[in-house]
Image (cartoon, rainbow, N blue to C red):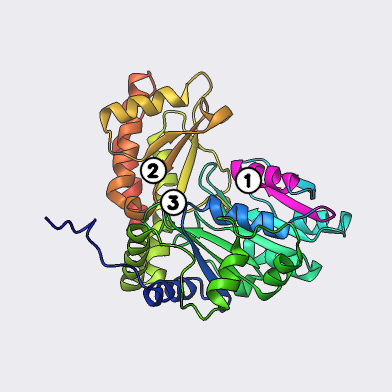
Amino acid sequence: MNHPLLDLPPLTADRFAAIERRVAALLATEQDVVITQGEALLPLEGCIRSGARPGSTALNVITGPYGQTFGNWLRDCGAHVVDLEVPFHTAVTAEQIADALERHPEIDFVSLVHAEAATGNTNPVAEIGEVVRAHGALFMLDAVASVGAEPLLPDAWGVDLCVIGAQKAMGGPAGVSAVSVSARAWERFAANPRAPRRSYLSLLDWKERWIDGGRRALLHAPAQLEMLALEACLERIEADGLDVVTARHASAAAATRAGALALGGGLEPYVREARDAAPVATTLRVPDGVDASAVVAAALAHDPAVPLVAGGGALAKEMIRVNHYGPDASPETVASALAALGAALREAGAVVDVKAARGAVTEVWG
């Protein structure tokens, strides 16, 4: 018996290349695009291990947990790492980046996360890219949470390595990702004797055997279901229009922030300034003496379908995250999440106004 998810014809090199071109169009980039067959940590680590080496100096910007991971990889490559850590309730500024580059003129690699879904902040990449470009360092951007949710223009912003994934605003699976690579990034990779080769982490393998080979023969059998899902994500975004998709995420963020304030119960936006808040997730600080993990558990008991999680690690007791990306960037989902939070907080003895929260969501979205 044939099965539509199992008995599929092989994914051809031509179709693989066509999907690459659609990713490039999504990013408005003229750079090479490599689709990697795994979650976005694969190309992120590949970029760092290809671009960093002993004797190099990297500026690693930490606005959330992924920045900490990047610093560990950079050090493992033998690079000297200058960490620029800012409070997770805010965003890094171009002025802070410029100051770090001025104090360390030897910096030749900069790593940054565009939007941190885990902490709910987003960084001003256009301004930062201008500073990094003037300095001359290679610029790597983790745009996994921002692609499809807010403007992303790697070429215009001077981004040499822009990594995306399908699992958030694109509304797809976690098992496929992509990276756009500038010409000078390829040059740096090729000049690095420690850059991975004949490895799943190797971007140079894709360059030499796939791109330079005219995209005629794939390096290995592609993850077919994930590739088809990525193609479907791109089709859906193209059909809706990228501007429409990003506007929907912006509305979801604004409505969640307004709705949480109207709900009351002591909830406050974790990211203090709305301009620094990511469009994919809104993080909320619970009142003193309230355990965020317990509130989330109680909310999910009321409505298991709402996209609520507690903060990770040390933030688990104080932060609640409302995810509103992909299909969850909708007024119905936002209102339901706030209603579930309201029910949980009321059980804990807080005074809440679910009707006011719903009204705020409707008003902002309208």
Quadrant where the C terminus sits is bottom left
Q: In the image, is 273 to the left or to the right of 281? A: right
Please, is residue 160 above or below residue 216 in the view?
Answer: above
Say what secondary structure mark 1 lies in: loop
Q: In the image, is 32 to the left or to the right of 329? A: right
Is residue 298 visible to us here?
yes
Magenta residues span 54-76
| Residue shown at 33% from the left, 39% from the top | 337
Residue 162: image x %, image y %?
58, 63
Name which of mark 1 and mark 2 comes first in the sequence.
Answer: 1
Q: Amino acid at mark 1?
A: Thr
Q: Which residue is mark 1?
A: 90
In the rendered image, residue 47 lying in the magenta stretch gets the answer no
Residue 344: image x %, image y %?
34, 25
State how far apart marks 1 and 2 are (Cα): 20 Å
Please, is residue 140 above or below residue 209 in the view?
Answer: above
Q: Nearer the viewer, residue 261 or 291?
A: 291
Q: Nearer the viewer, residue 203 or 250?
A: 203
Say what secondary structure mark 2 lies in: helix
Q: Nearer the viewer, mark 1 or mark 2?
A: 1
Quadrant where the N terminus sits is bottom left
Name which of mark 3 and mark 1 comes first in the sequence.
Answer: 1
Q: Amino acid at mark 3?
A: Ala
Q: Which residue is mark 2?
A: 259
| Residue shown at 79% from the left, 50% from the top | 79
